[in-house]
Image (cartoon, grey):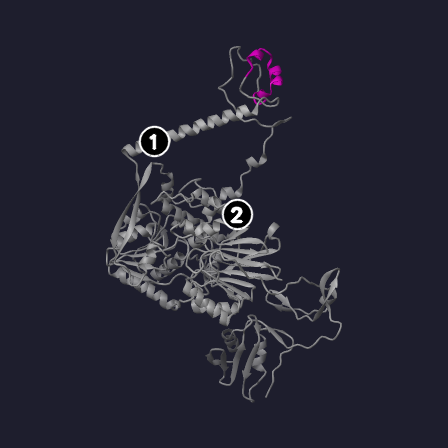
Amino acid sequence: MGTSVQVTPLSGVYSENPLCYLLSIDGFNFLMDCGWNDLCDPNLLQPLSRVSSTIDAVLLSHPDILHIGALPYAIKHLELSAPVYATEPVYRLGLLTMYDYYLSRRQVSDFDAFTLDDIDSAFQNVTRLTYSQNYHLSDKGEGIVIAPHVAGHLLGGTVWKITKDGEEVVYAVDINHRKERHLNGTVLESFVRPAVLITDAYNALNNQLYKRQRDQEFLDAILKVLRANGNVLLPVDTAGRVLELLLLLEQYWAQHHLTYPIFFLTNVSTSTIDYVKSFLEWMSDSIAKSFEQTRDNAFLLNFIMYAKRGLGAAIGHITLIINKSELETIPDTPKVVLASMASLEVGFSHDIFIDWATDARNLVLFAERGQFGTLARMLQVDPPPKAVKVIVSKRVPLAGDELKAYEEEQERVKNEAALKASLNKEKLRTSQGPDANTGDPMVIDASSCHISADAAASRSGGFRDIFIDGFVPPAASIAPMFPFFGGSGEWDDYGEVINPVDYIIKVEDMDGALAQGFGGDLEGKFDEGSAHLLLDTTPSKIVSTEMTVQVKCSLVYMDFEGRSDGRSVKSIIAHVAPLKLVLVHGSAEATEHLKEHCSKHVCPHVYAPQIEETIDVTSDLCAYKVQLSEKLMSSVLFKKLGDYEISWIDAEIGKTNDMLTLLPLSSTPPTHKCVLVGDLKLADFKQFLASKGIQVSIFTFGSLRAREQVMVRICALMTPGYLQQSLIDSPLDFDFKKVPNLLYKQCTKLGQARAYKL
């Protein structure tokens, strides 16, 4: 049998709930993502709580709440202690996302699911990997290799490839094949027949507009409102898809010399941009090339300036602000505000929506589908509601009797803590008993006070930490100082024994340290506005009221989620051609639709498990380890293919020292057909023919025509990377061998290709 593989969904199947899945490979348990929703529903984490103590490693794919939101909670409350793996952007931007979410919650509630310290503890031990880096696990995971690859959805977003004994398990959720302004498309299509592919059905029923058409409609909708003296609110995430929107707006504003102010408002907006501008190697090829040639950083603050408090609108197109009060100081002019959170449940977007919803001139433009049960999803229904009920909460200082009661309670708690500490110390002292090597270093026996200092020092071990030179305590004295009862320590000939580990400052602790200062952005620090909430120790309480908001503003949804649509997902899955397919994260309708399609056109083994349903997707193939004999290798001729060298081998299996070995054939090897290795694309071949002076005039699906004479048809590309059959039609008077020879140059040839002239 092959490598044992089991998949158990813990959340996010047959629904759009957060993503969280248990993947077991030969008994090694991976937790694939650890998401939560903006409502922080604890019921969603019940399946995770039952298996969290058995997790051996956590793999994070994207830096948003749906993929990492429950990680601090799981580590604090659910006994999740496994190492965590992610790319550098997922680690950094995920940390900022959790900071922003926590601060948004704390401003309107006594949020206690986790704290900022819990967030730091969850992220400080994350192992950061680069794209295509093969990381070999050890101990229980010996033999397992994990590698992150480009997903194309968010900055640092990951398709995880897990390899064991030559079999590949690919976890690819929220992928995007389109190349965008700041991101390359996914590399999932480069994978060839993995044993198991785990992917989502989120967009299986959706088709998208062309990118240029979508962008133009997006900009037209915004400008129409601005020119009518209205305001535009874009509820966005903290550090994910908002980056694409920022680049789109900044570039358009710069090209058309527009003066309408744009604001990016989150608790960590300045930190977000500061980090993003250092992640150029994780972005699109165009951004990296621009930086190499002109040192032009798309996220440097050429047009994105920091707001100066009290000075009104900042110079530039996009202003980064971290407090809603700064927005209120701006003159009443048409403006665009990108504010977190995208769900409108909490955060600055929630407050701004309440302020602007009653004005018919304004627009709320959703760039992604809201989570189920949130205000954003409620507003995206067709037709939209004319009024919605919202909870308005704010934190107010305590006063009067409430303040007095609070102070009395704090004093009582303080006294109880002091009394408990004193009792524990006395209990510890009495439980230690007399010890010849240790004693109370500050208590002196009055009966021996007239002996010499040297003798006293030699007789009493309690004076080991006090150097007495010519000082004899008075007869009436009890202690040279106030009584002190310290813990007993071990001693040797050189003094008290210390533990060197207590004096080591870990680099990880310094890197993730929180509250070492405020106002500078990370390492582990906050922006000034966010820090104010933490440093303000004034006793306060949350006051909440329910109100009805009349929705008179325009509500528009445009798909800027950065996910492949249904047609593209089907094409990518067919191209990858996995042996077994597992579908997760999507509505029931979308999941069943994609399951039915893939069962007919991709592979017969398609699974869509329910929550906590374990499916066995172990490969039906048998895997063996063999070694190549030296005699066989001496006769092999290799050909270069990219970074690899390949060859065709005819051999027979034998045994050498109880090890399976490939040996040279004892008889004449049989002939075999030519094998062309490569992934021929007609679009690339068309350009290659043009470079050789053969102009292609007609280009249709699956074929191209050159000089109105030669027709090249790709009849089968069912196995990616291998050209299975191509047909070339031409008249008798044409140089028949020319096009086939050019065609063969696009592939690596193993054997002799044959062209037949009829």
In the picture, the disc for residue 407 is 1
- Compared with 437, 711 (above or below) is below
- Compared with 115, 156 (above or below) is below
Q: Is residue 57 visible?
A: yes
Q: Residues within 10 Å of mark 2 (few under 14, many from 20)?
A: some
Instruction: Identify which residue, 55 or 498, lies in the foreground.
Output: 55
Disc 2 to disc 1: CB gap under 8 Å: no
Q: Quadrant of residue 257?
A: bottom left
The quadrant of the rendering that contains the C terminus is bottom right
Q: Is residue 493 left or right of residue 286?
A: right
- Image coordinates of residue 403 in percent, x first then y, are 31, 33
- Image coordinates of residue 349 in percent, x first then y, are 33, 52
Q: Amino acid at mark 2?
A: Ser
50 in the magenta segment = no
Q: Is residue 314 visible?
A: no
The quadrant of the rendering that contains the N terminus is bottom right
Mark 2–mark 1 distance (CA, rounded to whole Å):
40 Å
Q: Amino acid at mark 1?
A: Glu
Residue located at (50% from left, 82% from top) = 706
Of the image marks 2 and 1, the number of the one nearer the N terminus: 2
Part of the protein shown in magenta: 444-466
In the picture, the disc for residue 151 is none
Residue located at (54% from left, 73% from top) = 718
In the picture, the disc for residue 53 is 2
- Image coordinates of residue 504 in percent, x first then y, are 55, 38
Q: Secondary structure at mark 2?
A: helix
Q: Quadrant of residue 452?
A: top right
- Image coordinates of residue 53 in percent, x first then y, are 52, 47
Instruction: Identify which residue, 54 or 245, lies in the foreground.
Output: 54
Q: Is residue 18 left or right of residue 550?
A: right
